[in-house]
Image (cartoon, rainbow, N blue to C red):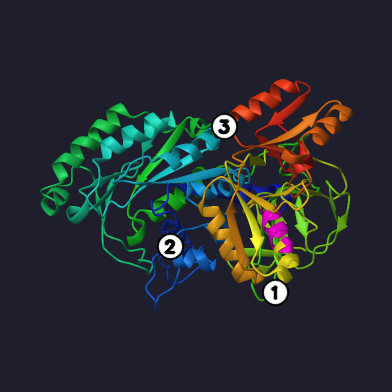
Amino acid sequence: MSQLSIPEEVARRRTFAIISHPDAGKTTLTEKILLFAGAIQIAGSVKARKASRHAASDWMEIEKQRGISVASSVMQMEYQDCVINLLDTPGHQDFSEDTYRVLTAVDAALMVIDAANGVEPQTIRLLEVCRARNTPIITFINKLDREVQPPLDVLAEVESHLGMDAVPFSWPVGMGRSFGGVFDIPNDRMRLFKSGQARRGSDADDFIDGLDNPEIAKRFPDTYAQAREEIELIKEAAPAFDHQAFLEGRQTPVFFGSAINNFGVQEVLEALVRYAPPPGPRPATERVVQPDEPKFTGVVFKVQANMDPAHRDRVAFVRVSSGRFTRGMRLKVSRSKKEIRPNNVVSFLSQRRELVDEAFAGDVIGIPNHGVLHLGDVLTESETLHFKGLPFFAPELFQAVEVADPLRTKQLRIGLTQLGEEGAIQVFRPVAAGGAMLLGAVGALQFEVVAHRLQSEYGVAARMMPSRFTLARWVTSDDPKVLRLFLEANAAQIAYDVVEAAAYLASSPAQLRVVQERYPAVQFHTMREHGGMVFD
């Protein structure tokens, strides 16, 4: 048990997500951060050779096959007297819902940019979510060991897309084959680049002190003059780092490096420990919850089925919002009013788990359960609270799903219900008799992943078929009678999702417009909240 008080433990916590466009090097950077924090001995690669390791954060079979992340993973480690909760998110836009929900559970974000491609569309989308929540962002510009865009161009792009000031903490000397290292601007020294793959370098890295040191010019005659010019320009033009402006989401510290070569990673990790905020207050519908309150509260921001295929388990990922969690304590689920006493609570290093005796605000813990906990559920010691801000977006793509073997219908239903509760896909049950189950997704790759997981995790061969529907809107009305009449009159277009929320399914925008005009007392929603069935 910790000897420190709750406020002291909370002050040690740093909880952040790594976000980026696919292939910018996000999972590789995650691995290297784990390496520097001493959590793993050898970093894995995403596109691993047959004999080598896969990345620790990519644990699902399909992730190893494709070399992409399709589910967020959580890793906890200690570094410099801080407890770091690191959440790796899928970069692929087809899984952006998972990423949006993860961003509601963190206090800061680390944005990874591929220096060759600059700021890409998916990065912009994620940034908008961060901006909406004023999440502080640290920027890491990756892949300097390749031929990339000039760093000043990348910096200008970051500023224009982020809409915030970029403050370089380091600056590259050369790139690609002529990449010599990065100049550490606050400490006025250059860290020399050494190409080294998976293992952690010694602390005795090569440094050359001072921008004016002739040694730098002697060793890098082709690249030093330009780098020096750019650094002097930056010192003049870039604003000084303002910690408050960073916390408010108006400034972003920028670091350059090469994640695959372990280069520049340590600086980023130290910046996160030094500058990223500890857990802050969380607004609930009823009141604002302070992190250092004595009583425990937590929110389920993710449910993952079958992390351990041998046990068919379901783990609810809970972000602790306040107080201290201890194993076996009585907790109330605000939605269902049920009481649970979780004993096998775990912390994560991706798939590797350790039993947790206690946790504090900012930590992410996993509670194994069999359908008791849903996305958006709030856990408290006694009071009823509803946290806001866990979105479910209206799907844009639909497919009907049928089981190839009718004897496996029950398994299909179980599999789809669990994957629906997990948020991997949205599952709709049409009211019309004989209607096949409908799957709704934000991106087409989600269907592929669901079919793969149904086969590998539930032993169900599912057939995906085209659907006539292209739009869904959740429906509510202030008048229950009006809603009932609407649902009866449009039964052929109505389906219920996993939490029994009614949705109207349309084949075209024109059809939706007509029905909206016909029923002015019915509200049509593009977004649903998880917790407490609140609609926006």
Q: Are marks 3 and 1 in contact (CB under 8 Å)?
A: no
Near mark 1 (Cα within 10 A), the count class, few <14, some 14-19 or many ≥20, is: few
Q: Is residue 115 magenta?
A: no
State whether residue 379 appears in this view.
yes
Vertical comparison of 361 with 487: above or below:
below
Question: What residue is disc 1 on?
Answer: 311
Which residue is rendered at x = 47% and y = 46% of the image? Answer: 110
Q: Is residue 419 magenta?
A: yes
Q: Amino acid at mark 1?
A: His
How far apart are labels 3 and 2 at the CA level?
Answer: 30 Å
Question: What residue is disc 2 on?
Answer: 67
Q: Earlier in the sequence, mark 3 or mark 2?
A: 2
Q: Amino acid at mark 3?
A: Ala
How far apart are labels 3 and 1 at the CA level?
Answer: 39 Å
Placement of the N terminus among the 4 image quadrants: bottom right
Main SS class of the magenta portion in the image:
helix
The x and y percentages for residue 346 are 69, 65
Position of 179 with respect to 44 (left or right) is left
Q: Earlier in the sequence, mark 3 or mark 1?
A: 3
Question: What residue is disc 3 on?
Answer: 132
Magenta stretch bounds: 413-422
Disc 1 secondary structure class: loop
